[in-house]
Every structure is written in structure tokens, then in C-alpha cells.
Amino acid sequence: MAENKKDNRARSWRLVVYPDSAPQNWRDILDEENLSWVESPLHDKDKNSDGTIKKAHWHVLLFFDGKKSYEQIEEITNLINVPIPQAMKNPKGMVRYLIHLDNPEKYQYK
């Protein structure tokens, strides 16, 4: 009897790149993988709930023509030393989040 397994593959994935742990050429590495991707401005003014500044980071969105599994994405993120990629349910909303467009309470990136 076949089990009903949830399809956890996605066409859009998001990740967080930290300047202090990613290789300096992380953008070149993504380009060499022939990916469609978008990068946020460096988020270096985001705050934690206690008011302290969060660790600087970039949000990166990856886009594919077909669905990719977590394991397939992890092969890419391992190349640039990025933790835990996440599938995106709303890519358009995430693009807006790159600069906090819909979050006026957060720092507004250009």
C-alpha cells in the first residue's frame, strides 16, 4: 500500500547569508550554479526584541523552473556555508520583505 507523502519540494527557496561565515565569492558561486536569485541589501540595522542589533545578513531568494527538494537546495547552500534553507510559499511577499516594504516598524532598507 502506497503511503501518502507530503511533497516538500518547492520552486522558490529562501536563505540567510552571513558575511562572517560565507565565502567572499558567494555570489560568484551562486552564479556558477546557473541560478536565478535575488539578494537583499545587507540587513545590518535589524533589531532583536530586546533592542539589540541582529547579526548582519543578506536574505537571498532562489528561483527554479521546476520543484527542488530540500536535499537539492542543501547541496547549493553547503557551497556557501548557509544554514537551513526554507521553501517559500509567497515569493512576491518575500521580495517585498527584502527591504521591509510592508513592515514600517522595521528599518526601511533602500
Image (tube, rainbow, N blue to C red):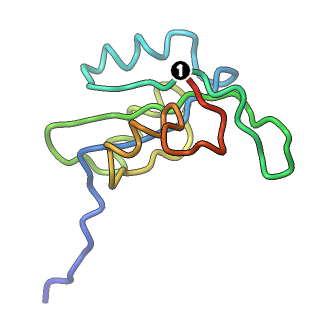
Q: Residue at x 60, y 22 (%)?
A: 42
What residue do we see at 57% from left, 10% from top? 24
Residue plotted at (70% across, 26% down)? 44
Q: Residue furthest front?
A: 104
Residue placed farthest to the bottom in the image? Answer: 1
Q: Position of residue 80 (x, y in %)?
A: 50, 25
Q: Amino acid at mark 1?
A: Lys
Q: Nearer the viewer, residue 42 or 10?
A: 42
Question: What residue sits 20% from the left and 81% below the top?
Answer: 4
**Front residue of this view, candidates 38 and 1:** 38
- Which quadrant of the structure image shows residue 16? top right
Q: Nearer the viewer, residue 12 or 7?
A: 12
> Could you tell me which quadrant the N terminus lies in?
bottom left
Q: Is residue 26 above or below residue 74?
A: above
Residue 49, compared with residue 77, is above or below; it is below
User: In the rendered image, which residue does mark 1 sit on?
Assistant: 110
Please tell me how crowded label 1 is: few (under 14), some (14-19), or many (20+) other residues with Cα within 10 Å: few
Q: Position of residue 22 (x, y in %)?
A: 59, 22
* Residue 59 drawn above or below residue 39: below
Image x and y of residue 34, in percent:
24, 19
Question: Would you say 39 lies left or right of 7 here?
Answer: right
- Pinpoint residue 37: horizontal percent, then vertical percent: 33, 26
Q: Is residue 6 left or right of residue 14?
A: left
* Number of dots carrying numbers: 1
Mark 1: which secondary structure?
loop
